[in-house]
Image: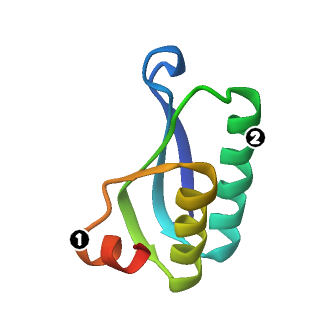
Amino acid sequence: MPTRITQLGDERQEGVVLRVEGTLVREDAELLERVCADIRRQQPESPVTLDLADLTFLDSESASVLCRMRRQQSVVLEGLQFFVQRVVE
């Protein structure tokens, strides 16, 4: 299944939530990183959360990109399985 990114919720109340579904490889993760950077530029006060509960595959390169996003852009990662979360950390 290709990567699918959907914006959820009302950004005025809870920030921007992006649901990521399917597989996540480096190219898709880098696109997601650019999308989050654009959101942060347009809405610097709104928190950005990635809902990753519906990922079916995550490679190590995309895990590195997610880690960088969390560190550099303060993106919140939610819904990761325990083992994958430990890898990202």
Determine the CA span between mark 1 and mark 2.
29 Å
Give residue 46's mark: none
Q: Amino acid at mark 2?
A: Asp
* Side (left or right) of 16 relative to 34: left
17 above or below 87? above
In percent of width and height, residue 57 lies at 43, 75
- Which residue: 45% across, 56% down? 21
The crowding category of the residue bearing disc 1, from other C-alpha atoms within 10 Å (few below 14, some 14 to 19, many at least 20), is few
Which quadrant is the C terminus positioned in? Answer: bottom left
Q: Quadrant of residue 33?
A: bottom right
Q: Residue furthest top?
A: 12
Identify the amino acid type marked 1: Phe
Residue at image coords 51%, 84%: 60
Q: Position of residue 20 (x, y in %)?
A: 48, 53
Q: Earlier in the sequence, mark 1 or mark 2?
A: 2
- Position of residue 7 relative to residue 1, above or below, is above
Q: Which residue is mark 2?
A: 38
Q: Is residue 61 above or below residue 8?
A: below
Mark number, residue 82: 1
Most foreground residue, 55 or 86 = 86
User: Which structural element holds mark 1?
Assistant: helix
**Left of 72 or right of it: where is 23?**
left
